[in-house]
Image: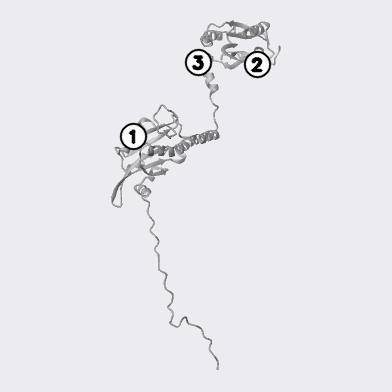
Amino acid sequence: MSLESGVTASKELLELFSKSKDGSIRMIQVLVQEGYLVPHSSHPPRGSWEEDYEGLLLPALRHGPCYILYRLDSRNAQGPEWVLIAWTPESSTLRHKMLYASSRAAVKKEFGGGHIKEEIHATMPDEVSLEGYRRHLASKAAPAPLTVAEQELQQMKISEINTDINVDSKRPTLQGVAFPIEDDALAALQRLKEKRFPYVQLRLDTEREVITLVDERPIEVADLPAQVPADSPRWHFFLYKHSHEGETLESLIFIYSMPGSNCTIKERMLYSSCKGPFITSVEQQLGLDIAKKVEIDQGSELTPDFLYGELHPPQHAPRPTFDKPPGPARSRGGPRRIVRPTTD
């Protein structure tokens, strides 16, 4: 039967194709010679398809450009499933490359496209090794690259996920937190509660999807601005010691620093969506008493006056009231009246 390439399958190949459907053949090697698809070799199975794979297939590559039909152990409604490999090594002539590219459809049609599960075009041996075949399957199963708009939509969906579901149950987690929290971060928050360290900084590892410890240290309020990075968001806990109305206080402040456009869309959305559940959990389960929660763009905002004003906003003094001034005094005879003069 002649196809667009002008290549036809020989009688011997058609007979071999027909015989192969009973499962008695593991591999068929096909060449293009003088306008015909002809069988070069065929091999019966010896073990499983994985055990036979490289021992049968790789030696066949030495004969130059060819087609290889390799039978897997899986089946579909039409029978055993096969892999079709079009092998044209880089050293092939342009004529051979064009010939095998144009006759590929003929091989599929004569063999039966319904039997072919995978197709591979290879120019290097490692592309058709067993590991190369597995890479092909993994690449085929991977999701297609997302556009920027699709990525933003995906992050929006992430932010709507019920935060009661833990990402990794093997790590210690705080119930209700979207991402697990690592051991050292939990320990640092406990030391903060015990007032052993006045400052703890945490971050979301968006690749591993965990909450990690960045730093804990004994600092004063004057050192606080320098702890805020200018290119990535952070969560800070600071135990602010100060005096108010003659009383010395220690107030725990939660600071969410988000340097705006310097952060990715993914970071902004994940930090925002996880912040509420995280704060609720550390308050309820770790017993941290957060006196104030603030959001900033940059570290320079964290001045003593700013923190004091957030904790103790000035109370507006009541507006003074004034008594309404009394009206003019009236005479005993009542209000003065205008009397029209009389004429004689």
Q: Name the residue under label 1.
A: 188
Q: At 52% across and 16% down in the image, what residue appears?
A: 132
Location of the N terminus (image quadrant)? top right
Upstream in sequence: badge 2 or badge 3? 2
Residue at point 36%, 30% (across, down): 183
Residue identifier under label 3:
131
Quadrant where the C terminus is found in the figure: bottom right
Identify the secondary structure beneath mark 3. Answer: helix
Q: How far is disc 2 from disc 1 in space, using C-alphas? A: 65 Å
Q: Earlier in the sequence, mark 2 or mark 1?
A: 2
- Residue 247 lies left or right of residue 162; in this view the side is left
Residue 176 is drawn in which quadrant? top left
- Crowdedness near tag 2: few (<14), some (14–19) or many (≥20) residues, C-alpha within 10 Å: some
- Helix, strand or loop at disc 1? helix
Picture coordinates of residue 231 (x, y %)? 42, 37
Residue type at mark 2: give it: Ala
84 vs 143: above or below: above
Q: Which of marks 3 and 1 is nearer the N terminus?
A: 3
Structural distance between the alpha carbons of marks 3 and 1 = 45 Å
Q: Which of 116 and 181 is in front in this view?
A: 181
| Amino acid type shown at disc 1 | Ala
Q: Could you tell me if residue 71 is visible in this image?
A: yes
Label drawn at residue 221: none
Residue 84 seen from this side: no
Residue that sits furthest to the bottom in the current view:
344
Residue identifier under label 2: 105
Q: Is residue 271 left or right of residue 227?
A: right
The spot of residue 62 in percent (x, y) is 55, 8
Q: Position of residue 142 (x, y in %)?
A: 53, 24
Side of 25 relative to 192 (left or right): right
